Image (tube, coloured by chain):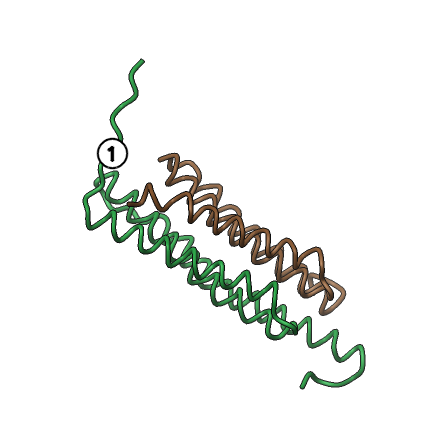
Chain colours: A brown, B green
Amino acid sequence: MTAAVLPWVIGAFVIALLLSLGRLLRGPTAPDRILALDTMYVNAMALLVLIGIELDSALYFEAALVIAMLGFVGTVALAKHVARGRIID
Amino acid sequence: MTTPPPFELPLWADALIATLLVVGALATLLGAYGLARFSQFYLRVHAPTKATTLGVGGVLLASAIWFGVRGGTFLPRELLITLFVFLTAPVSAHLLIKAALHLARLKDGSLPK
């Protein structure tokens, strides 16, 4: 059951990534683009976890953890840069 | 060289993992569709932050069950990411809305309707 469903789930996440990429390219404001990047890193992380299930390997977990942490820091830095003009206060 | 036979999941784990994956995929797809289609930023920020959290939570839970049943011991490392995402997604959404409000007030000095 899982093996039959998994390609469709991966396809759904890829479509979600493409929709977010469209918002990233279209804008129109800076927070829109940051929000699209935020969604994209979360989706990419889930995609890595799905590939880990598909290939039956636990290696992808560490990469997903690193993406989760760096993505959050990046989103916070970009949002603070837009709101205040500086990142560290 | 012979490949080992594929691992057979028990039926309950198979059904549970498949359900979690499908629910997660549908939620993520809805969130991304809302992000692409809604008309205002304050609507757009609403869709992916909630739906993606549910979607990623489902996928990570499915992965935890998969590797737990597969390896025999339940070592929920995926729950670490789940906890982290659930903690950080509201914080980043809050910061984004603050940034958008700041930009709106710089532009015409008024708050959004």
Q: Secondary structure at mark 1?
A: loop
Q: Chain of mark 1?
A: B
In percent of width and height, residue A4 lies at 33, 43
Q: Quadrant of the N terminus of chain B?
A: top left
* Horizontal arrangement in the rendering, residue A18 relative to residue B54 (left or right): right
Q: For mark 1, does the 10 Å Cα neighbourhood hold few (<14), some (14 to 19), or many (20 or more) residues?
A: few
Rendered residue at 39%/34% (across/down): A55
The residue most toward the top is B1
How many tags in the picture? 1
Q: Residue at x 61, y 66 (%)?
A: B37
Identify the residue under disc 1: B7
Q: Nearer the viewer, residue B40 or B104?
A: B40
Residue type beneath disc 1: Phe
Residue drawn at x 71%, y 59% as measured from the top left: A26
Residue A51 position within the rendered picture, expressed as x and y whole percent measured from the top left: 43, 40
Q: Quadrant of the C terminus of chain B?
A: bottom right
Q: Please state if B99 lies on the left or on the right of B3 as rendered.
A: right
- Relative placement, left or right, of B104 versus B85 is right
Task: Please state the horizontal and vertical placement of residue B53, each as a whole percent of the image.
Answer: 46, 62
Q: Is residue A18 left or right of residue B78?
A: right
Relative image position of residue B39 (x, y in whole percent): 65, 73
Q: Is residue B97 above or below residue B113?
A: above
**Front residue (pair A87, A40):** A40
